[in-house]
Amino acid sequence: MTSEQQGTRLPDPGHAVYAISVAAELAGIGVQTLRLYEQHGLITPVRSGGGTRRYSGDDLARLHRITALVAQGVNLAGIGRILDLEDVNAELSADNDRLRVDQDET
């Protein structure tokens, strides 16, 4: 049964709704660790008008990727580079897909 079938609806993955303590718990890390990742530029939460950090489902997925890399022994600088390369690769794949669709339409 999906969450919508049960009467609950999860927020859009890009919508920042989780407070830092909830995000840390869902990612299985400590709040201070989450702040450390933010200081190193590995994650950038949205800030509310009052400055409160808010994390999205996409941020949680990124945190899970970070924790997997840490578990493999990659240092934070290496993780930053890996994440940057993965982001660029995802953008290039999306661009490639759009170009294929455009080509098929012509």
Image: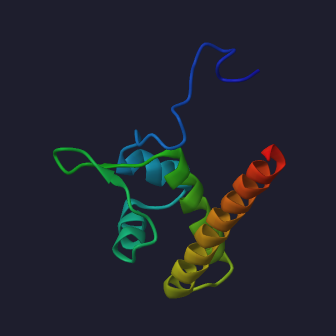
Residue located 38% across and 72% down the image: 36
Residue nearest the viewer, comparing 78 with 23: 78
Residue located 70% across and 53% down the image: 98
Number of numbered tags placed on the structure image = 0
Is 99 above or below relative to 75? above
* Lateral position of residue 6 relative to residue 57, left or right: right
The x, y position of residue 22, in whole percent, is 43, 45
Residue reaching furthest to the left = 50
Is 37 above or below relative to 7? below
Is 63 above or below relative to 14? below
Say which quarter of the image contains residue 49. Answer: top left
The x, y position of residue 45, in whole percent, is 37, 56
Looking at the rendered image, the quarter that the N terminus falls into is: top right
Residue located 60% across and 13% down the image: 7
The x, y position of residue 52, in whole percent, is 24, 49
Residue reaching furthest to the front = 106
* Lateral position of residue 64 relative to residue 34, left or right: right
Say which quarter of the image contains residue 92. Answer: bottom right
Colour convention: rainbow
* Lateral position of residue 84 relative to residue 106, left or right: left
The x, y position of residue 103, in whole percent, is 79, 53
* Lateral position of residue 76 relative to residue 47, left or right: right
Say which quarter of the image contains residue 75. Answer: bottom right
Residue located 75% across and 55% down the image: 97
